[in-house]
Amino acid sequence: MPVHTGIPGLLRAFESLRATHPEFVLATIVETAGSTYRKAGARMLITADGAIHGLLSGGCLEADLCEHARKVFESRSEHTVFYDMRSGDDLIWGLGLGCDGAVRIRLEHLSADNDFAPLFLIRDALERGVPAVVMTVTETGHNQIRAGNHYLYTRYGPAGSDILPPELLEAAAEVLATERSSLRELSIGGQPVTVFFGMVSPPVRLLIAGAGPDAAPVTEAAALLGWEVTVTDHRESSARAERFPAANRVVHCPPEALRDHVDTGALDAAVLMTHKLENDQRYLARLAEEPPAYIGLLGPRARKRQLLEGLGETAAGLEDRIFGPVGLDIGAELPEEIAVSLIAEIQAVLRDRRGGHLSQQTEPETGAVPDAAAARSGLYAMVLAAGGSARFGALKQLLEFNGQSLLRQAAGKAREVLEGRVVVVHGPKATRCQREIAGLEVENMVNEEWESGMASSLKAGLKSLPPDCPGALILLCDQPLIEAAHLDRLIEAWCEDPSRIAAAHDAGGHGVPAIIPRRYFQELLKLTGDS
């Protein structure tokens, strides 16, 4: 039973089988509740002879799904199956899953008659290289939007020639913003339409610089996850495609020419494995121009410091993206073990996870969006007060307005709405500023790198927040007309959907105060300067 992981693997299976299999059944999870093996958006391909490609459960549902697929092949239609494992009833069915969750799965018949939709749309989305949403109409009472219709939407808008109603486009844009597949019931022109919005994200793009023997297991482990892997080396004898069959590309070029051959700005992660300090330095200098979220360096911490020192001022802003020694602590020694450790660390960083034991987490990081009560009770305020006030000519934080300093006003209003959960980030004259807000029972954080710009204060504050914090209310200390009532309204708006960003709006556009959900913290940590 061949199993291909992820959407890229599913498409590879489809392309290899299409010449010999004229039809398929595509099984897609469209809705889940509670604990399930896979979440909405997971897909599996079933052939007429019962072979499956992909997994929607740990092997528990697949046999039963194949039975349902057989009926779909016979009827050449669509069918939806619902499994509820939240009680002992599944024992009666002979499943005995005990997963404490429920899952709804849609089965679609695919053939040349329907252009193998939506697989071609998914392939189109991946080729575009940007996150996209594939919309599937599952039920409809609309006289123009038919069940089984598929549409593609990217950040550039709808793809293709279809003119789509605004209700559909707005919902697709929301799914794209949250990156969470969902089944939604819409009212389009007063008529009910149920649509599954499935996220299609481009694969992780990994660069391995150094084509030594230990790069092979890293390439193979990444390929198993469906990542797009490029291996590069300045030695022609090492940079040979036959040595790395799991890689998408093998590039022979000197480090200085890397950007001529690889779109470094599109990379998600890079690992330097040349085993020579000079060569790693040359590759790192090229990557620093458009750094990915993760740059792994082999060797001890002293080697990492040496590499960063060699970059000089270029190293500014890279500290949060450089990882060395690489990998999670799993006791890895052999190349294959190190590869597992390394790939796991990249996965954790890109998904904003800590990589600890799930069994030891008091509140497992499932990625679930908290409800309104949990969101408000866990929300933290972060007052950014580390500016040098260069244009103002004096320390703006201590300027008095209506008889009270701007700093004390901002911290006091934050404490009024989120008592006990306020962090104030200080910069110059930190001791004096802390005395100014003495007695307010806030947590003080000093940003020693305040001169590099506001982004450093933002990152310092984020790192001080507890791991279960669902979001951060970001405030500046020089907005004295912002009242606690304004902050309350902003929090209420955010609590309506804690997966989204809530921001203030005025004549100049969107800005702070703003509430950023935890799912975006990793992106904030990539900012530099005054961004």
Image (tube, helix red, strand yellow):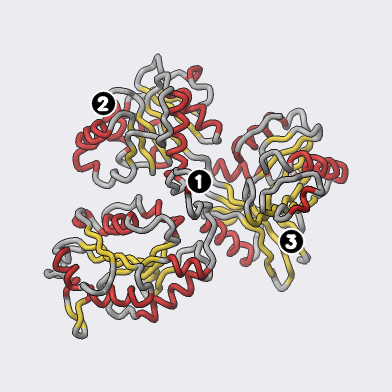
In the picture shown, does residue 446 fall above or below 492? above
Q: Is residue 372 left or right of residue 237?
A: right
- 293 or 258: nearer the viewer: 293
Q: Nearer the viewer, residue 420 or 296?
A: 420
Query: Is 31 situated above or below 335?
Result: below
Question: Residue 145: image x %, image y %?
Answer: 74, 61
Name the residue type under label 1.
Leu
Q: Which residue is mark 3?
A: 145
Among all residues in the image, which is located at the extreme bottom? Answer: 402
Q: Nearer the viewer, residue 497 or 92?
A: 92
- 220 or 10, which is in the foreground? 220
Mark 2 in CB contact with mark 3 (< 8 angstroms):
no
Task: State the residue position of label 1.
Answer: 358
Q: Secondary structure at mark 1?
A: helix
Would residue 406 appear left or right of 482 to someone viewing this image?
Answer: left
Q: Of label 1 and label 2, which has the lower sequence position?
A: 2
Amino acid type at image mark 2: Leu
- Is any part of residue 159 visible from this angle? no
User: For the residue carrying disc 3, how many other residues have a C-alpha within 10 Å: few (<14), some (14-19), or many (20+)?
Assistant: some
The quarter of the displayed image where residue 27 is located: top right
Q: Which mark is residue 484?
A: none
In the image, which is nearer the foreground, mark 2 or mark 3? Answer: 2
Residue 277 numbered mark, or none: 2
Nearer the N terminus, badge 1 or badge 3? 3
- Between the C-alphas of marks 2 and 3, the distance is 60 Å
Element type at mark 2: helix
Instruction: Report the residue at 36% width, 58% height from top.
Output: 465
